[in-house]
Image (cartoon, rainbow, N blue to C red):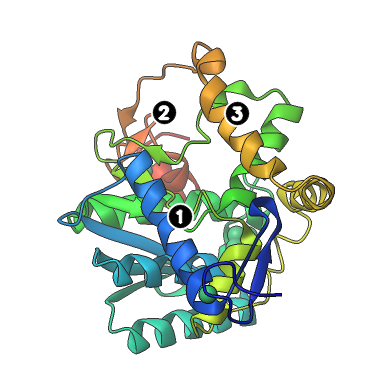
Amino acid sequence: MKCRKCGERAAIKLYQHNLSLCREHFCEFVEERVKKAIHDFCMFEKEEKILVVISGGKDSLALSYILNKLGYSVSLLYIDLGIDEYSDNSRKFCEEFARKFALSLKIISLREEWGKGIRAFCCQTYKSICSLCGLVKRYYFNKVAYEEGFDVVATGHNLDDMVSALLSNLLGWRTSYLVKQLPLLPEEGRLKKKAKPLIYLTERETAAYAFLSGISFLREECPYSRDASFLRMKHLLNEVERSSPGTKFSFYRGFLEKRHLFQEQEEKVDLKDCLLCGFPSLLEICSFCKTFRKEEVKNAGKI
Ligand code: FES
Ligand code: ZN
Ligand code: ZN
């Protein structure tokens, strides 16, 4: 198998593009896909300050590496949920990455902030760690981006993440969630814009890029995400992609073209400022404060 660009030994075959590439040309291909996504959706400019949320996994580290290589102003944020060895390991990969590429890294640790790991905060509303995890991460990246003057929050969601969420929401006809599966969400009050520059790349491509670029990343999956329904969707979509390469991409592109069909289903909600933390909330007290600041909520007479 030879690289189509230079004739050297190919490192990877990209079935959906019917293209074999060597290490150098594959890395170039990946970086071009990221540039294209940033450009197509006007995600950000060189002078904007980007906060990249990292987990120690291949996607977020590859994204940080590429943005830094392309000359963007990148800072990293790692949220340590206190999930036993898994969090300790992922934190180590993040620290090592930041050191190696001389990037600034902020770490927020639930155990340091609240004295306990995430498991202790599961409750009636957030029964599983997995559902609470999204709330915690969103709260902190919005807070850090706002308080520290970032222009944009970038996350390492790849094409597989987007299409599996899309399929899951389609199967349940959750149209108000469907319309939010976008590569760029605009700034809204204290919430900075959110960008997903890896949307033109599959999980296999980001993993290969991280490996071929010499990035050390955590291969272990979070012990609590194993049963998540989106993982089942990913397996399913991989099966379809195997027999019909390019399906994931055309599914997502089709959604972007037809998104207007669901637009009117988008619920227009009036967000208030949470009485305790000041961040946008549907109710007087936001879900994060309700879960983590129970005493204060009680004292404020809100439960
Ligand atoms: Fe979110 Fe494991 S990282 S539940
Ligand atoms: Zn080549
Ligand atoms: Zn709040």
Is residue 281 placed above or below 249 in the rendered structure?
A: above
Q: Label 3: how many residues lie within 10 Å, few (<14), some (14-19) or many (20+)?
A: few
- The residues bearing labels 3 and 2 have C-alpha atoms spaced at a distance of 35 Å
Is residue 287 placed above or below 8 in the rendered structure?
A: above
Left or right side of 34 for 291:
right
Single out the residue that lies furthest toward the front.
Answer: 7
- The residues bearing labels 2 and 1 have C-alpha atoms spaced at a distance of 40 Å
Quadrant holding ligand 1?
A: bottom right
Residue 33: image tag: 1
Mark before the other along the chain sequence, 3 or 1: 1
Name the amino acid, label 2.
Answer: Leu
Q: Secondary structure at mark 1?
A: helix
User: In the depicted view, which residue is nearer to us: 248 or 128?
Assistant: 248
Q: Secondary structure at mark 3?
A: helix
Residue 129 visible, this angle: yes
Name the amino acid, label 3.
Answer: Gly
Please tell me in which quadrant of the rendered image residue 188 appears.
Answer: top left
Mark before the other along the chain sequence, 3 or 2: 3
Which residue is disc 2 drawn over? 283
Please tell me in which quadrant of the rendered image residue 247 appears.
Answer: top right
Which residue is disc 3 drawn over? 254
Residue 82 visible, this angle: no
Q: Secondary structure at mark 2?
A: loop
User: In the depicted view, which residue is nearer to us: 124 or 222?
Assistant: 222
Name the amino acid, label 1.
Answer: Arg
Single out the residue that lies furthest toward the top.
Answer: 264
Q: Are marks 2 and 1 in contact (CB under 8 Å)?
A: no
Residue at 46 percent across and 49 percent down: it is: 294
Q: Label 1: how many residues lie within 10 Å, few (<14), some (14-19) or many (20+)?
A: some
Q: Position of residue 24 (x, y in %)?
A: 48, 77
Mark before the other along the chain sequence, 2 or 1: 1
